[in-house]
Image (cartoon, rainbow, N blue to C red):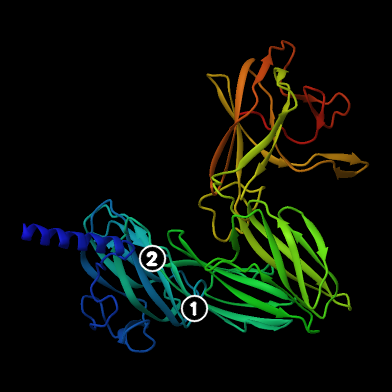
Amino acid sequence: MKYWKTSLVLFLFFFALVLVTGYSQSINLLNNGGFENGQTAWNGWNSGITLSSDNPYEGNQCARFTVRSSIDQSIITLEPGKTYKMSVRIRINAMSGNDWGGIRFSVISYNWSEWHNSEAFSPQNRPVGIWFQEIIEFQPTQTQYRAQIGFFGGSGWNVDFSYDDIQLYEQIAQNAPPVIQSVAVTPLSGVVPFTITGQITATDSDGVIQNYVVDTGDGAVYSGSSSFQHTYRVPGNYSLSVTVVDDNAATDRLSTSIQAISANNHVLQIDSPTASPGIDYYLTNQSSVLISGIRQNGSGDIFWINTKTGQSGTVTVSNNLFQIPAVQLSPGLNVIEVQSAYGDGTHLTDNSRIYYLPQNYSGPLVNNISATKTQAKQYERINITFDIVTIAENPYFPFDENKPENLHTGSGITVDMEFTNGSIVKRQPSFYHMEVSRSGNILIPSGDYQWTVRMAFKEPGIWTSRILARDSAGLTQVTGPTFTIMTDSLAKGYVSVSVSDNRYFQYDDGSVFSGWVTAPR
């Protein structure tokens, strides 16, 4: 019994260790990948490929190449069908010329029949004088391979480059996200115009950082480099946001506050509410919020607006303090902007990002469903409208679980309507729409935005419907109207040439439109 208990304890310990280290990188299948054991395990050294203590990435040594050649390790045993990665650190010390090829690393089957190559690197596509990391991912079809690092290209190159931290490992089942260690920004404040410089330090334990995205908060976005520079020209308080993306599209994010000060000491700042720890917005489950802050050396009232709801107003300033009570919130990200004027006509702005997530919210809320008709003839157009309350930031962009980090659209929402007569199912996309009226050549809004579906039925009979709306919180399904479609032997289709103006089409009910019509799917 004592032996059994001891074995159980050991098993639980190692099981817990596996859970804790589930994100850890798999074992390196290469020997001496950091060259700390000299030339051990690598074949092909010559007078132009040497060990160097000049600027190694880590440790005391790296492999330095001053010739267009390569070194390799073999035999490496891999398992066909599994996924493997090979990652390296490369430093271009100096390189000139203009020919095909470049610095390249590969995993090659031992009989040379199968090659998994990186792209070719040169000063044309990579920085000079700093270490950068590259990776390839592949699935072997054989068992014996060699790993090769070096150069593959034309004789028109003069080269001097280094390799370090060479790793070949099996891709673990669960990808570990990247981690931002720091974002060093200098300075954090200044009188406009002033320029900041920044350096991002980030790592990925089971791959590489594929992209860096810097949103400066004043409309500028930079990507592709771990270092950045930006000039702030408009006074205000900004949230600089940095996102890093690894080779499996996992991300990490970090924000820094930047204060751009007016040259005339005009100050405007929201003090409450402040961002929640670790994120760049204030999270609440309350439907309204009080905004307070300071204003110095400005004139007149403070103007404010909730850019999500359109609610706006003005408040007075007393003893350099202001308060905006009971700002109503809509589910999702609300940006409350405040603006103050100075006597010379200049303005200051600040904003508070407030994310309202109602209790028990699990997807878009659909209400106020109406249809222009529930009895119609074949091919006759029917408009269905409804309102949606959603946490989505952008109603014009579809919801996407894997939206690229450099696509700064805000989170979206997908809304469709499904119709069935019991044997046929048709799905129509919904669109966010505002009716307009024409005044000469001017279109004037004539109502509020609503979600709209346009539908026309080919098959007569009874059709039921439902609305499917999805945002980042989940999918909502709501029953829609039931439609009775009657046979019309004279109807020829959904649209025809307009009887009043042959430059346009018209629906079968006689209403005119220009452009295309979406037919049901």
The percent coordinates of residue 401 (x first, y second) are: 51, 50
Q: Please tell me whether mark 1 or mark 2 is closer to you in this view.
A: 2
Q: Rate crowding at label 2 as few (under 14), some (14 to 19) or many (20 or more) other CA atoms within 10 Å.
A: many
- Kindly indicate the quadrant of the structure image that contains residue 59: bottom left
Q: Secondary structure at mark 2?
A: loop
Tell me what residue is drawn at x 11 percent, y 62 percent.
6
Tell me what residue is drawn at x 54 percent, y 41 percent.
475
The residue under label 1 is which amino acid type? Gly
- Kindly indicate the quadrant of the structure image that contains residue 48: bottom left
Residue 153 seen in the current view: no
Q: Earlier in the sequence, mark 1 or mark 2?
A: 1
Residue at label 2? Answer: 207
Q: Which residue is outermost to the bottom?
A: 54
Between the residue at mark 1 and the residue at mark 2, the CA separation in whole angstroms equals 31 Å
Q: Rate crowding at label 1 as few (under 14), some (14 to 19) or many (20 or more) other CA atoms within 10 Å.
A: few
Residue at label 1? Answer: 97
